[in-house]
Amino acid sequence: MKHLTDIFTETELAGMSLPFKDAAAPPATYYTSADLYELERERIFLKEWLWVGHAAQVAKPGDYFTFEVAEEPIVVVRDLTNKLGAFSPVCAHRGAIVVQGQGNCRSFMCPYHNWTYGLNGKLIGAPTMTETKNFDPTKHGLTRLKVDIWEGHVFVNFDQNCKSLATFLGDITRFVKNYDMGNLACTGRKEYDFPCNWKMVAENNLEGYHVTGTHGGAGEYSKIDHWSIIEGRGMYDILLGEFDEPLSMNVPGNASAPTSMISELTEVEQKRQYFILLYPNMLLALQPDSTICYVMLPQGPHHTKVIVDWHYPKSILDRPDFATIDKANVEGVDGFNDQDIRVLGLAAKGYKSRMFRPGRYSVHESVVHRLAQYVLARIEGHDAWKAKGLSENQSASK
């Protein structure tokens, strides 16, 4: 396995590692290196808590859904005793994927040789394997993964020795509690293809510096003084938008007053938008009328699939104008994503040029620097990253 010193020069590493006000922005290889991408898969995506779906997808015994992140397939299932589980769906025989999609069932049967697994991951059927010397079915179940639920969102971790999800999340609950996310309904999903590295998408979602140029027609959204950074006590950071009136992303590439409201929000929260990055790759966008789940899935070093889900209070779903509200919010995000896809594609092209030289950060890009420090620390195997570390008794409640 490669090391950072095999990918970056000493000068590049030193420049990236300086304190924010002195640091250089990352070199092109930070966004283009296939070797770095493999290190990120191994030391970030196989080590951190990752969003994979919603609790409503596994509400009843037998319910399951599948997901893939960093080229690793996952199945989340509620077994027949109502216990939630997550597994790698790779058959313990010859490696075929035993289940795809979502649904409700009583077992998983591999389509290759009919090895069958219970919803608890145990091997319960393997044709003719009784004739194989010393074959022990208890040693050939599906590989179990860590799984937990927070505010209606399902998270999985490949690392059996990981810290709890609550410790990972830290004190994030103080920002999200009034949005009552665990009781919101997911009403739709769209996928977007970004022609760039996943870190470019994550950076873009956490800095307000680009709004004037990229989203310059977005009214109050394009005024940089409305945006600020909150450094999280936990594995999250926040881009905070504060406005004179409530705003939602309900116009293509723009924002206007929402026609509904999440009922428990304070007057201050109604005039705010929180863009919360849960490291490494999940963004929660909290609006006055809805929340948006925005997940960045690396497809190699040069492409990112972004999954976007919309969530609303169940009371809004019965309104006669709900379809209009939902359509406007989807078109609003479409517009912002179209603008971001365009400029990030241009930046990705620039990173491939031999003429590119790393620049310096603006005062509005501290989170871009923090993301780089996170990546470098995880690649080097360091768990400590933020000065504001958490102990178990400081962690978020589920």
Image (tube, grey):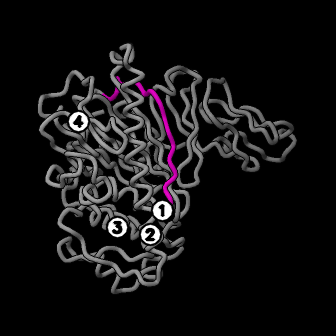
Secondary structure beneath disc 2? helix
Q: Which mark is residue 377?
A: 3
Provide the major secondary structure of the magenta segment: strand
For residue 378, what is the image quadrant? bottom left
Q: Which residues are magenta?
A: 181-197
Marked residue nearer the N-terminal end (2 or 3): 2
Crowding around mark 3 (Cα neighbors within 10 Å: few <14, some 14 to 19, many 20+) is: some
Residue topped by disc 1: 196
- Residue toward you, 350 or 13: 350
Q: Within 10 Å of the Cα at label 4, are there few (<14), some (14-19), or many (20+) other Cα atoms?
A: many
- How far apart are the alpha carbons under marks 2 and 3? 16 Å
Q: Amino acid at mark 4?
A: Leu
Q: Is residue 375 left or right of residue 38?
A: left
Mark 4, secondary structure of its residue: loop
> At numbered mark 1, what does the secondary structure look like: helix, strand or loop?
loop
List the residue tagged with mark 4. 247
Residue 159 shows in the view = yes
Give whichever of 350, 102 is nearer the camera: 350
The answer to the question of whether label 1 and label 2 lie on touching residues, with beta carbons closer than 8 A, is yes
Residue 259 is drawn in which quadrant? top left
The residue under label 2 is: 31
Q: Earlier in the sequence, mark 4 or mark 2?
A: 2
**259 versus 161 height, above or below:** above
**Label 4, label 3: how many angstroms apart (C-alpha)?**
37 Å
Element assignment for label 3:
helix
**Left or right position of 178 against 132:** left
Under mark 1, the amino acid is Cys
Q: Is residue 230 visible?
A: no
Q: Residue 211: x percent and y percent?
A: 27, 55
